[in-house]
Amino acid sequence: MLLYKNFCNETFNENCTLKSFELKYDDNYNFGYDVVDVLGKKNPDGTALVWCNTDGVEKIFTYKEIMELSNKAANVFKENGIKKGNKVLVILKRNYEYWYVAPALHKLGAVLIPATNLLTVDDLKYRINTADISAAICTPDGTTAEDMLEAQKLCPQLKTIFVARKDLEGTVNLTNAIEEASSVLEKVETNVYEPMLIYFTSGTTGYPKAVIHNHSYTLAHILTARHWQAVKENGLHLTVAETGWAKASWGKIYGQWLCGSAVMAYDFDKFSPGKLLKIMEKYKVTTFCAPPTVYRYFIKKGMDKYNLSCLSHVCTAGESLNSSVFSTLFAQTGLTLMEGFGQTETTLMLANLNNTNSKPGSMGKAVPLYNVQIVNENNEPLPDGEIGEVAVIPPKEGIKHGIFMGYCGNDELYKKVWRGGIYHTGDTAYRDEDGYFWYVGRTDDLIKTRGFRVGPFEVENVLMEHPAVLECAVTGVPDELRGQAIKATISLTQGYEPTKTLANEIKEFSNKKMASYKWIQYIEFNNEMPKTISGKIRKVELKENHSEKADK
């Protein structure tokens, strides 16, 4: 059921490529009522969610079941004091409960705050205080619920803690409560421009920022699902993401259900490329999206060793990929990897959309929903080929579909990123003459060496071609002659030892492929890279702890 057609106008050119895209909705639009409940009534037996875990347990939910379970959950939350506007922290990993807890909170007009189970008590305390969180919903796995109880002692505003499938003193067993609750819910009136969702970013500097989205955010992901991920009606889409991160909103619920595709959820803690490929083979996944690291492991495992004949489309975002991954993946699957770009603060801004010619390594073109430009320090658009900041120019009517409405508790930062009336992403890139955008790096990551500006990815891209390099991070370090010298911190693949000989080999291999001003001067091996809780390498920490062991 292609419900998304009720919420947008779109046109296509002669090649069936998306030409224009506009959203349309009522002021009281709510994903819970207008999508989940409509699907539950008009397509009751349609598959909404296919869930399994590493123990072989499997659960399949229909749209009717999701509708009824979300109503029951909403009634449980309401009976326990959660009402419109309340902030609710949700830590459910890849547990199936997420897919009816999220719509339940939307129906109540409560603000959903997904988070990862990797948070410490201090992390929880920071989030509870920053967003004034009054309730939490926890996974039964690990120590999340116990940690939440500890955080509650420090944060009295946290009144109620729910735990799925678990009895724990001081908490509500969510599963038992839902079983006893009514599936009839009295509708709560909400407005499309009211806060619906808050994500805490993982940022490489400073404390995480609390990004607020309104209800229209869910509709902006029609573009993500339909025209980038190319999900199929009655298909099965798998995005590799834990529900605590914004990537889950991109690929595990909103756009997929709007576009008639079921969602595949594989509940795991430790990533295994072979096991994930077997899941894709077993359940006949039709479309797939994952961060670049997953594809690097996949091609090393050999995707051609698995029956992925049902797989029709693959895409990626999160960090840039070197061209060798694209070519190897195509050789193994016959599929072209379609890259895209967006942020926690936005939906899909740039993409190699379905039915377009992908340029390997490019983030693609601006999607029709946004006017994306490359600008200089004065907010002036730059000509093609020049590096500047990626910025979004808002439409004249002022509605910013899919772009966040504020940072919780930090109005000054919100004003800063909207300086000059345009949204500053903090990412640098250039646009080629064909309109494709090419990522360079974060504005604060640019390395200035010998009068040149070098984007870390330019060097990282070459380094990743060496078989010994599993992960790498390129930073600038102080240098009397150059201003900054280029340093590579490298995590090695299995079977390689961190020796001076290998450092020289990698340096020679890479420098041969780059202009002299991009040459690597220092290499340091580190198989325990400092990372954010979402897995991004903390370059700021690498800069602060520049090791004297670095091999020059």
Image (cartoon, rainbow, N blue to C red):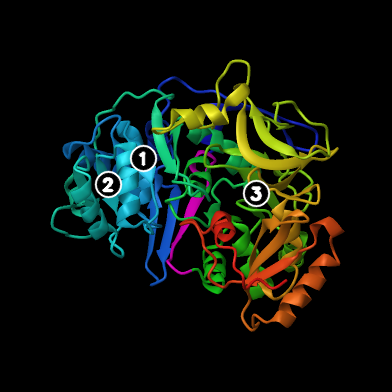
Mark found first going from the N terminus, 3 or 1: 1
The residue labelled by disc 3 is 445
* Label annotation for residue 112: 1
Q: CA distance from mark 3 to mark 1?
A: 32 Å
Name the residue located 83 percent from the left edge and 35 percent from the top edge: 384
Q: Which residues are magenta?
A: 257-270
Q: Please tell me whether residue 267 belongs to the stretch shown in magenta.
A: yes
Neighbourhood count class around disc 1 (C-alpha, 10 Å): few under 14, some 14–19, many 20 upward: many
The residue labelled by disc 2 is 136
The answer to whether marks 3 and 1 mark residues whose Cβ atoms lie closer than 8 Å is no
Amino acid type for the residue under numbered disc 3: Asp
Q: Position of residue 462 (x, y in %)?
A: 77, 63
Name the residue located 47 percent from the left edge and 28 percent from the top edge: 412
Amino acid type for the residue under numbered disc 2: Ala
Query: Can residue 223 be seen here?
Result: yes
Give the foreground label among 2 and 3. 3
Above or below for 4 versus 343: above
Q: CA distance from mark 2 to mark 3?
A: 36 Å
Tell me the SS state at disc 3: loop
Q: Position of residue 466 (x, y in %)?
A: 74, 72
Nearest the camera: 372 or 417? Answer: 417
Q: Position of residue 75 (x, y in %)?
A: 22, 38
**Quarter where residue 212 is shown:** top left
Name the residue located 73 percent from the left edge and 71 percent from the top edge: 552
Name the residue located 32 percent from the left edge and 50 percent from the top edge: 124
Nearest the camera: 453 or 293? Answer: 453
